[in-house]
Amino acid sequence: QVQLVQSGSELKEPGASVKVSCKASGYTFTNYAVNWVRQAPGQGLEWMGWINTNSGNPNYAQGFTGRFVFSLDTAVNTTHLQISGLRAEDTAIYYCARGFYYDSDSDASDVWGQGTLVTVSS
Amino acid sequence: DIQMTQSPSSLSASVGDRVTITCRSSQNINNYLNWYQQRPGQVPRLLIFAASTLHSGVSSRFGGSGSGTEFTLTISSLQPEDVATYYCQQSYSFLRAFGGGTKVEIK
């Protein structure tokens, strides 16, 4: 079946880096974008950006430039989110989600990964 | 940037009630509006895209309407399994902002 499976929870110290993976299966990986969404504890959803799985071109929302990097490994249908210089406020669940385009420039996230909890604490 | 504002932030209604959630955008987004449901402790789930198109497998109790800057999500007859937080998201501009969410509880 169509699914996105994310890597497991991470506990990191401030200043460290983390890499979250999101492996797609059950569909043609390069036919859909991948969005990344953050959810801090007890808070709402925050769209971080997306990656074009054809070109590998990443696009970042304001507030997610610099320390956040989206990348691809198309050989294994996997998208990665790397966060460097971790801060306590980066503690959150990070979701990847498949973006299906219902119009030329408009998409919706129809399949979601299970989420990866990243905890930043000393 | 386009800002998305939902109201109310929370509501409590009885089983069987009709529930309406409003989402307003800071500028015209035509009908490029998605709705998601996130049940407690679960992953978000797509309910509606293009303002009014029900996603596959979603109950017909859910309906969406609106265009331009004002949109509504309606639950025609609230059920216990509808307890969740609902989010709108615009897909008109490059920055796909979410609304702040509306928490729906059973009275």
Image (spheres, coloured by chain):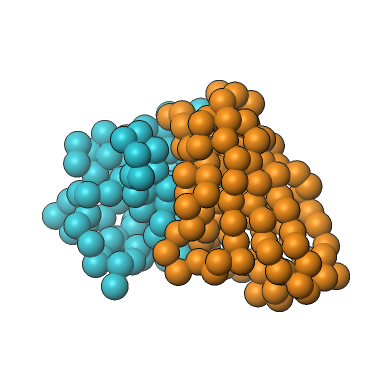
Instruction: Estimate the x, y position of residue B25 in percent, counting from the top left.
Output: 62, 31
The percent position of residue B45, horizontal first and vertical second, equals 51, 61
Closest to the observer, A122 or B9: B9
Please give the name of the residue rendered at 41% of the width and 56% of the height, measured from the top-left corner. A110
> Does residue A27 lie above or below B22 as drawn?
below
| Image quadrant in which you'd find residue B106 | bottom right
Question: Which residue is the extreme one toward the left?
Answer: A75
Residue A51 visible somewhere in the drawing = yes
- Please determine whether, in this image, residue B94 is positioned above or below residue B49: above
Q: Residue at x 35, y 63 (%)?
A: A4
In the rendered image, the vertical position of residue B59 relative to residue B23, given as above or below:
below
The shade of chain B is: orange
Q: Is residue A92 above or below residue A84?
A: below
Q: Residue at x 33, y 66 (%)?
A: A3
Which residue shows up at 66% across the image and 69% down it?
Answer: B82
Q: What is the letter of the cyan chain? A: A
Q: Nearer the viewer, residue A102 or A26?
A: A102
Could you tell whether A24 is left or right of A36 in the image? left
